[in-house]
Image (cartoon, helix red, strand yellow):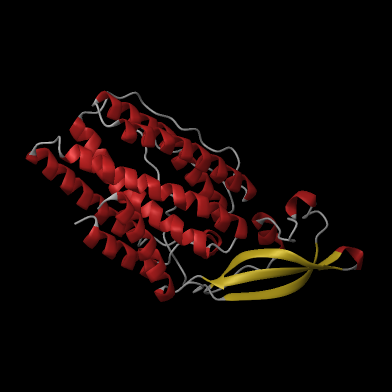
Amino acid sequence: MKRDALSAFLRGLVISALPLATIGCCDDEAQSIPVRVDGFVDAGDVSDAGALTYPVCEQLCPKGTGEKALYGCSVSEATDGGITEVRCDEERTRCSAFPFGAGGRPPLGLKPRRRVETHDPVGAFFAAMAHVEAAAVDGFVELATALAVHDAPTALVADARRAADDEARHARVAAAFARRFGADGLPPVEIDAVAAPSLETLALANAREGCVLETWGAVVTQWQSRTARDRAVRRAFVNIARDELRHAELAFAVARWLHARLDEVSRRRVREAQRASAVELARDIERPAPPRLVAAVGLPDRNAARGLIADLRVRLWS
């Protein structure tokens, strides 16, 4: 599928699926409780909108029971004697999705990410995203270098370098959100040195990481730009989604260029790798995620994700 047609298809896929999805399936419920906040809350714990940090909410609010889980809390009304009305928001845990966010292209030799300790699943999500996006900077530089070595068109090389700049910006945005949601000490990107990729190695990585995972990232980030409950997160994903669409276009442009330079045996292995990656992705979306994460960052629910992937497998990954 050519670039303009691919972008139109991916945008249309999301727009057509949104009315059918169970957006907002996490039924909200709230209660306001009088609590003494002395010793719990300081200026750094309260946003301009009155929202409290998640660890503070866990201390101040009653624990969720049954199907209910704490989403967050906010200062509602101050009274005398250090007593403050705090609104505690809960939602049903039956709403679930997979913890999969913006796309990225990991470099060959990327080491596993170190764990980040945080009480907030949203902070953990953005910490993981910051690592993925920072690693993708090296991944796209690696792609640009390999394309140049193999005498690819200069436009492809330039697009790969531009994508590296995009990923550096995404990493900064994700790191800022990670800190906002309580994740500090973000893990560094660690990469082992590897040999320059052959054309087939390059094609296999592009099929898995580009044509499947980056394309899925383009779909998910478009979804997040429309559904994330947090307004700042939603605005950020508008720009990220635009970039990820270009990265998906680049992946398929690279695939077309490589296809003409591989023999039939290598082409078959690339097709098999792409299909296997799509199958693995379909398994990954069955993993549940905390409802607070689903709502805050706007991940598609499991049923919506199944439908989106089914369409992608028919149109792009067959």
Image quarter in which the C terminus is found? bottom left
Image x and y of residue 82, in percent: 87, 63
Q: Is residue 22 left or right of residue 236?
A: left
The answer to which image quadrant residue 233 occupies is: bottom right
Of residues 105 and 94, the one nearer the viewer is 105
Image x and y of residue 204, in percent: 22, 40
The answer to which image quadrant residue 183 occupies is: top right
Q: Residue at x 33, y 26 (%)?
A: 145
Q: Residue at x 56, y 61 (%)?
A: 296
Q: Is residue 312 above or below residue 160?
A: below
Res. 108 in view: no
Image x and y of residue 283, in percent: 30, 58
Q: Residue at x 39, y 61 (%)?
A: 11
Of residues 56 and 156, the one nearer the viewer is 156
Q: Residue at x 23, y 42 (%)?
A: 255
Q: Residue furthest left?
A: 264
Of residues 68 and 252, the one nearer the viewer is 252
Q: Is residue 258 above or below residue 242?
A: above
Image x and y of residue 125, in percent: 50, 51
Q: Is residue 105 above or below residue 306?
A: above
Res. 141 in view: yes
Q: Residue furthest right?
A: 80
Give the tally of numbered discs: 0
Of residues 155 and 232, the one nearer the viewer is 155
